[in-house]
Every structure is written in structure tokens, then in C-alpha cells.
Image (cartoon, grey):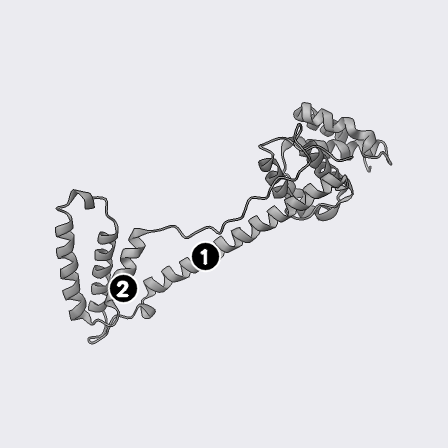
Amino acid sequence: MTRMWPPGGDTRRPSTPRVVAPREPIDPARIGRRVGRRRAKGMDAGAVAAALEDARFDARQASRHEDLADDVRGPAELAEWERIDQLLAAAVPGTVYDPDADGVVQAELAADAAAAAAREAELREAARIAARADELQALRELGTLEQTEPRDGDEAVRDELARRAGGYVQADVDGWLAHALSARLGHYCDPAAREAAAGLLTPPVLAHAALLTELVRLVPGADVDQLAFAARLTTAEPEAAGALASFLTRARPKGR
């Protein structure tokens, strides 16, 4: 039977939002610094000093206009001329300005490259989560989600499915993850993944997993359908379910 998701909706899969590449934010101050460097390239100390005086004159003129009061590009370019002037003043006479040999510029470029790489990684991760969410939704519609083992990162996919559903708590996905965590299926066979899950899954899911673990120890061989009441209990009273799981753990005979 095809499941309705979210409740009251039809069975058509929600469209996946297009993943848009995050753009580098516009920074007028950075633009001002780059303009100054480009103009200063190849200049010696005398030429830079003359350009600095021109920049100071322009700054004084701009200060007279109220509409330029919030301008940050001009002051940033002026500050860059002052920095380059000091850089050449401390250099060997006859040295010309070369951005490729400027440690400040190279550090800024390295930071820009790192930020661009981080944005690209963020984009790839968003695309991966969206694709996996589509896959899990298809499995839900086929009624085979329970036979699927979770993968690393499915906790974020759960959040994506909830976001698409407008925050609706999806009992089937939560139950699937709780059972997998309890039975150590998929990536949850790794102790590190189980430990990480404590900070990635919601308290009801974690309480459900803990309660399932203890119930299966009490009744070995019990299947998921027989323990459906655990999901209802953890949804209604997650703290009580967690407390019950802790109590059953303490009550367990030593060595079991």
C-alpha cells in the first residue's frame, strides 16, 4: 500500500529544491584594497607616495558629501595606499610594488581560496543530502524503507525530509533510524557513529532506540512489529521512555 506523506497529502513526491551555489559576498572594502593594489603594481616608492597624496585629496573631497558618508571602499583604498607606501619605504631603494610578493595579499588570497573551497564543499553536501532524501522518499512510497540500512549522514537527511514536510514529525523515518541504531545496522555498526548520533538525532528517536535495545534483551527474537508500542510511548513521553530504558538497563542481570 502506498503511504500518504505528509498526512492528508497526495502520494506525489515533493519537488527537490534546486541547490544554488553560494555566492561570494560583495565586500566594498575588499574591492577598494584590490583597486589600490592593481594601480600600485609596478610603482616605485616615489610613484606610490604621489598616488597616496592623490588618494588623500580624494578622501578629503569625499568627506564633504553626505551621500558618501557611509562609503567604505574609498577609505579602504586609501588605507591600502598607506600600507603599500610603508611597505616600499622599508624595502631596498628601487623596489617596485609587486602584489605577488606581498605577504598580506598572498594571505588574503589563500583565505579566499579556503573560503571558496568551503562553499563548494557545502554545495556538494547539500546536493548529496537532497539526492539521498529523494531516495529515502522513494523507498517510503515503495514500502521498503524498513529493509534499507542507514548510511553516514542520514541524520541530516532526516532533517531535510522534515524541512520539506514543514516540520512534520515523520514517525516512519524516526522509527527506522531508532531501530537501526538499536540493532547497529548500516553505519551504526561503528561505535563512533552511534556516539555521534547522540548529538544528531532528536531525544524521542534516541529514547526509542534505547528502549528497543532493552526490550530486545528482555525478549530475544522480538521483531519490530511486536515492539510498535515503543514508538508510540517515545513519541508521547520521550523522557519517560528514556527513563524506562535506563531503569531496564539497571535491572539487567550483570554480565548480560
Q: Is residue 199 visible?
A: no
Q: Indicate which disc, 1 or 2, sits on the residue closer to the N terminus.
A: 2
**Visible residue check, residue 133:** yes
**In what quadrant of the picture does the C terminus appear?**
top right
Q: Secondary structure at mark 2?
A: helix
Q: How many marks?
A: 2
- Residue type at mark 1? Ala
Q: Quadrant of the N terminus?
A: top right
Q: Which residue shows up at 14% across the image and 60% down it? A: 54
Give the residue at the far bottom of this rendering. 94
Whole-percent x and y of residue 90?
22, 68
Residue 32, above or below 184: below
Residue sitting nearer the eye, 126 or 156: 126
The residue furthest right is 221
Point out residue 113 in the picture as x, y percentages from the top left corner.
Answer: 43, 60
Q: Is residue 216 left or right of residue 60?
A: right
Q: Relative to 94, is 146 on the left or the right?
A: right
**Quarter-wise, where is residue 220 in the image?**
top right
Q: Position of residue 139 (x, y in %)?
A: 73, 43
**Residue receiving disc 1:** 116
Residue identified by numbered label 2? 37
**Residue positioned 66% across, 43% down in the render:** 195
SS under mark 1 = helix
Q: Residues within 10 Å of mark 1 (few under 14, many from 20)?
A: some
For label 2, the crowd category at 10 Å Cα-Cα, with few meaning under 14, some 14 to 19 and many 20 or more, is many
The residue positioned 54% from the left and 47% from the top of the image is 18
| Amino acid residing under circle 2 | Arg
Is disc 1 in contact with disc 2, using a CB cutoff of under 8 Å?
no
Q: Nearer the viewer, residue 14 or 201?
A: 14
